């Protein structure tokens, strides 16, 4: 099983990953990014991430990477 890591410095706040995650584990953070919008963060307190990498695949900035447990 794997999960994901988001590089906030690369995020351009398009929110495609948020819309894509089947478990709704990616949320807006309270950090403003380079586009002037909130960057996203991974919130998975109950280890629900499927490791499906759909979020990483849709990210145009390659800001999301898979991490192996
Ligand atoms: S890997 Fe899948 S389940 Fe995990 S955060 Fe990305 S889209 Fe959601
Ligand atoms: S898809 Fe990538 S650039 Fe868009 S909000 Fe998600 S992490 Fe940021």
Image (cartoon, rainbow, N blue to C red):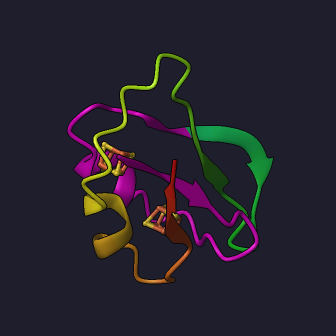
Examine the rendered structure and indicate whether residue 25 appears above or below residue 12: above
Query: Which of the pair 41/49 is nearer the observer?
Result: 49
Location of residue 45 in the rendering, given as x and y in whole percent from the top left corner:
56, 19
Q: Is residue 18 magenta?
A: yes
Location of residue 64 in the rendering, given as x and y in whole percent from the top left corner:
51, 67
Name the residue: 35% across, 46% down: 1
Name the residue: 76% across, 72% down: 9
The boundaries of the magenta stretch are 1-27
Location of residue 8 in the rendering, given as x and y in whole percent from the top left corner:
71, 63
Name the residue: 39% across, 73% down: 59
Which residue is situated farthest in the top direction here?
46
Examine the rendered structure and indicate whether residue 60 appears above or below residue 36: below
Name the residue: 56% across, 31% down: 43
Examine the rendered structure and indicate whether residue 29 appears above or below residue 45: below
Query: Where, by quadrant of the figure, is residue 32 drawn?
Result: bottom right
In the picture provided, is 57 more to the left or to the right than 34?
A: left
Examine the rendered structure and indicate whether residue 47 appears above or below residue 11: above
Which residue is situated farthest in the bottom direction here?
61
In the picture provided, is 62 more to the left or to the right than 6?
A: left
Location of residue 16 in the rendering, given as x and y in whole percent from the top left corner:
34, 61
Query: Which of the pair 46/19 is nearer the observer?
Result: 46
Query: Where, by quadrant of the figure, is residue 39 drawn?
Result: bottom right
Query: Which of the pair 14/59 is nearer the observer?
Result: 59
Query: Which of the pair 26/35 is nearer the observer?
Result: 26
Number of marks in picture: 0
């Amino acid at each position: 099983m794997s999960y994901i890591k988001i590089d906030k410095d690369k995020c351009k706040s398009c929110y495609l990953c948020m819309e894509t995650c089947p478990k709704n584990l990616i949320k807006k953070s309270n950090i403003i990014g380079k586009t002037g919008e909130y960057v996203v963060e991974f919130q998975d307190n109950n280890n629900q991430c499927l490791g499906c990498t759909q979020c990483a695949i849709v990210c145009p900035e390659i800001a999301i990477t898979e991490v192996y447990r």
